Amino acid sequence: MTPLDTALAYHRAWTGKDLDAAMAYLAGDIVCDAPAGRIEGAAAYRAFLEPFAMSLTGTEMIAAFGDTERAMLMYDTASALVASAPGAECVTVAGGLITHSRFLFDRLPFHLARAAR
């Protein structure tokens, strides 16, 4: 599998709410740099991702590119809280596993939706 294949399979798994399958694509010592800060290790990453993944009502892939070490995905997600929440991940893959993720998303729509409740 290429890094892009790995990233797409991982994305399909977590957006399909199959966190066990998604975790199979992550290295145990994954490092994720996200808007809230650095997340280290697969267990901490799952704890970060699972609540969001379980809240999804839809996803749309916008673009996906890769080379021999990295893949870049840009997508839009929908949940009961926010109708459109675009995100992007640039992942590094080694030995078929994602070892690093640079995960970007706009937190403002979530903040505004929670404040309006």
Image (cartoon, helix red, strand yellow):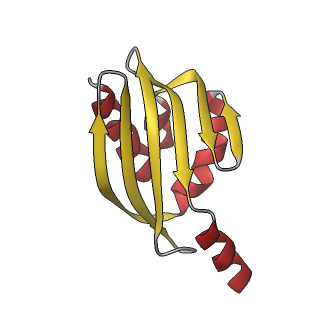
The residue sitting at the top extreme is: 95
The residue sitting at the bottom extreme is: 116
Residue 61 percent across, percent down from the top left: 31, 55
Quadrant (top left/top right/bottom left/bottom right) for the C terminus: bottom right
> Is 81 positioned to the left or the right of 87 in the image?
right
> Is 107 positioned to the left or the right of 71 in the image?
right
Can you say whether 3 is above or below 102 in the image? above
Q: Residue at x 65, y 45 (%)?
A: 48
Asked if residue 13 shows in the view, the reply is yes
Asked if residue 117 shows in the view, the reply is no
Q: Nearer the viewer, residue 10 or 75?
A: 75
Q: Nearer the viewer, residue 116 or 80?
A: 116
Q: Residue at x 37, y 40 (%)?
A: 72
Question: Which image quarter: residue 24?
Answer: top left
Quadrant (top left/top right/bottom left/bottom right) for the N terminus: top left
Residue 68 percent across, percent down from the top left: 30, 21
> Is 100 positioned to the left or the right of 36 in the image?
left
Question: Which image quarter: residue 31?
Answer: top right
Q: Nearer the viewer, residue 90 or 95?
A: 90
Residue 63 percent across, percent down from the top left: 29, 51
Total numbered labels: 0
Q: Residue at x 73, y 80 (%)?
A: 115
Q: Residue at x 71, y 43 (%)?
A: 37
